Image (tube, rainbow, N blue to C red):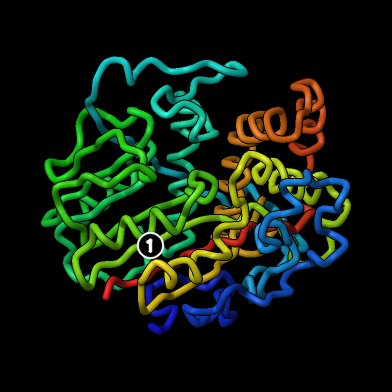
Amino acid sequence: MAEAGGQGVPSLSPGTPFATGNTAAGDAQHNLTAGNLDAQDQPSASDLSPDARNRDPTTLSLSDQSHFSTGLSVDEDSDADSALGDVEAQQSSQSVRASIYEFVEEHGRTFHRYKQGRYWLPNDEMEQERLDLQHAVFTIRLGNQLGLAPLNSPRSVLDIGTGTGIWAIEYAVEHPAAQVLGTDLSPIQPEYVPPNCRFEIDDAEDEWLFSETFDYVHLRMMFHCFRDHVGVMRSALAQMRPGGYMEWQDWLCVLQSSDDSIRGTPLERWSRLYVEAGNRLGRNMLAPRRYKHWMAEAGFVDIVETRLAVPGNPWAKGRDNKRMGFLQMTNFLDGLHAATMKLFTKGLGWTSEAVELFLVDMRKAIKDPSIHFYWTTYVVYGRKP
């Protein structure tokens, strides 16, 4: 196994480690006890549908988190506004048949029509701005890098679930000798892009028909998008050159805290309900915990898993942490309604009114600096032999 770290990712606190080391690629799962999510925080039998209870328990257990040092410390004398910086966002590209541009409207938001319902979040201007903000959070957390895989002059790059295309565009600018292709279900990318960047409408769970082979396949925030993650990994492996890398970057949707401050809050309840709603809709919402194992199963080698902490609001000490926490708080608030409304009404059978009431308390909790919650960021990459 290659060693984690050494990729220029900064620690959140001087002298404090924040990421786990690597775990063997063949391990079935992480035997973890991290955070403050113990057995009593797992969904009870009465909370779970019969189908959910009969699934692989690794898809449901919220307590199976590996312990790692987050590198975050509570700012006891917090003045969040004084430590916040500006965020720059870019946009991206595409051209396809006119029918693809006919979006579906639901709950006042627009969604993709191609493969309707496959992706749960909207694709309107509000969501596009949020996606670019999310990109900024990831880039900061990765030490101003677009990825951690140890690539050497990639010639052909695939970005699956490219969204606004901002990652693909920035990668193309940084690597002018590489040809970068971004794929998505929604044609929301910009018209003007670097000459070495292009976009296509595509579903990664369909048969891969690309004419080229890739040195680097990148995916971000795709944990809830696939029914068969291993199938996508195998498709990628078959379409890659020997020595190429596949890299997954995702947040685990189970919120944790550096102390007991999350216990009994709407944030803790939201985590359990969000996982259950996704499970009822046929998606493994805890998929990032399995990427390492699944990549080994698909045939990748030299698999590296890194876990990083992103503060959920500006509660953590330090200018960089506060800025990252503020951006992530804004990202969560901007995406909360769309993600929760879709899953809770369709997966849990809640009424839209019940969701709206619940979100009132959620928004208050998200902005509460006395709740020291964070998102665990998984970055997992592996090499094709």
Q: What type is the residue that disc 1 sits on?
A: Glu
Q: Residue at x 63, y 39 (%)?
A: 281
Against 72, residue 268 (above or below) is above
Viewer-proximal residue, 236 or 356? 236
Relative to 211, say whether 2 is above or below. Answer: below
Residue 253: horizontal and vertical position, in percent?
A: 64, 52
Alpha-carbon neighbours of circle 1 within 10 Å: few (<14), some, or many (≥20)?
Answer: many
Q: Nearer the viewer, residue 316 or 379?
A: 379
Residue 337 is drawn in which quadrant? Answer: top right
| Residue 323: % across, % down | 56, 53
Q: Kindly identify the residue that appears in the image at 29 percent across and 35 percent down.
A: 92
- Specify the quadrant of the image occupied by residue 193: top left
Q: Quadrant of the N terminus?
A: bottom left
Give the left or right position of residue 159, taking residue 374 as reference. left
Percent x, y of residue 301: 36, 77
Residue 169: image location, x then y, percent: 26, 44
Q: Is residue 223 above or below residue 108?
A: below
Residue name at image x 41 percent, y 75 percent: 303
For numbered disc 1, what is the local secondary structure?
Answer: strand
Image-based side of 50 in relation to 155, left or right? right
The residue depicted at 51 percent of the width and 47 percent of the height is: 227
Seen from the viewer's position, the closer of residues 60 and 56 is 56
- Whether residue 67 appears in this view of the structure is no
Location of mark 1 (residue): 247
Please state which of residues 239 and 343 is positioned toward the viewer in this rendering.
Answer: 239
How many callouts does the rendering have? 1
